[in-house]
Every structure is written in structure tokens, then in C-alpha cells.
Amino acid sequence: MTDHSPPRRTVEVDADVYEVLARTAASRDTDVNGVLRYLIEVPTPRTAVDDDED
């Protein structure tokens, strides 16, 4: 039987970025990994389309 767990990845961030991730994790009652999963899964917002009236 093979292990189908996703590979682990290490991401290095600046201390200021980690502080923001940690505060966000605390406010969402999760850990830093949970915040990163949330950010990865959030769909990218659509850009505003200019209405050209010719």
C-alpha cells in the first residue's frame, strides 16, 4: 500500500510576514498552516472591466 498524503513543503517568509500570519491565525482560531491553506484556496477576484461606450 502506498502513502497518498500530499508532500510537505517549507516556505520561508520574513519575520514581519510571519507575524501577520500568526495574528491572522489567532483571530481565526487556527494555526499558520490553516491561514496558508485559506489563502491558497481563496479564488482570485476578477479585475474590473472598463465599460467602453463607443
Image (cartoon, helix red, strand yellow):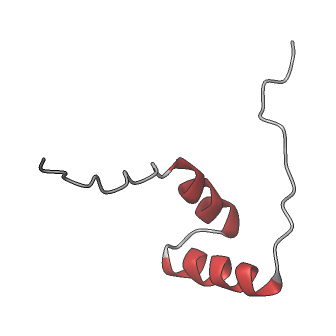
Image position, residue 42 (x, y; %): 48, 52
What residue is rendered at 87% in x and 56% in y?
10
Image position, residue 48 (x, y; %): 31, 57
Residue farthest toward the left in the current orientation of the protein: 53
Residue farthest toward the front in the current orientation of the protein: 54
In the rendered view, tell whether residue 6 sits above or below residue 49. Answer: above
Residue nearest the viewer, comparing 47 with 37: 47
In the rendered view, tell whether residue 12 sits above or below residue 16. Answer: above
What residue is rendered at 69% in x and 61% in y?
33
What residue is rendered at 81% in x and 85% in y?
15
The tally of labels here is 0
What residue is rendered at 61% in x and 54% in y?
37
Query: What quarter of the picture does the N terminus occupy?
Result: top right
Horizontal side of 25 relative to 6 (left or right) equals: left
Horizontal side of 26 relative to 7 (left or right) equals: left
In the rendered view, tell whether residue 21 sits above or below residue 45. Answer: below
Image position, residue 13 (x, y; %): 82, 72
Residue farthest toward the top in the current orientation of the protein: 1
Horizontal side of 10 relative to 33 (left or right) equals: right
In the rendered view, tell whether residue 45 sits above or below residue 29. Answer: above
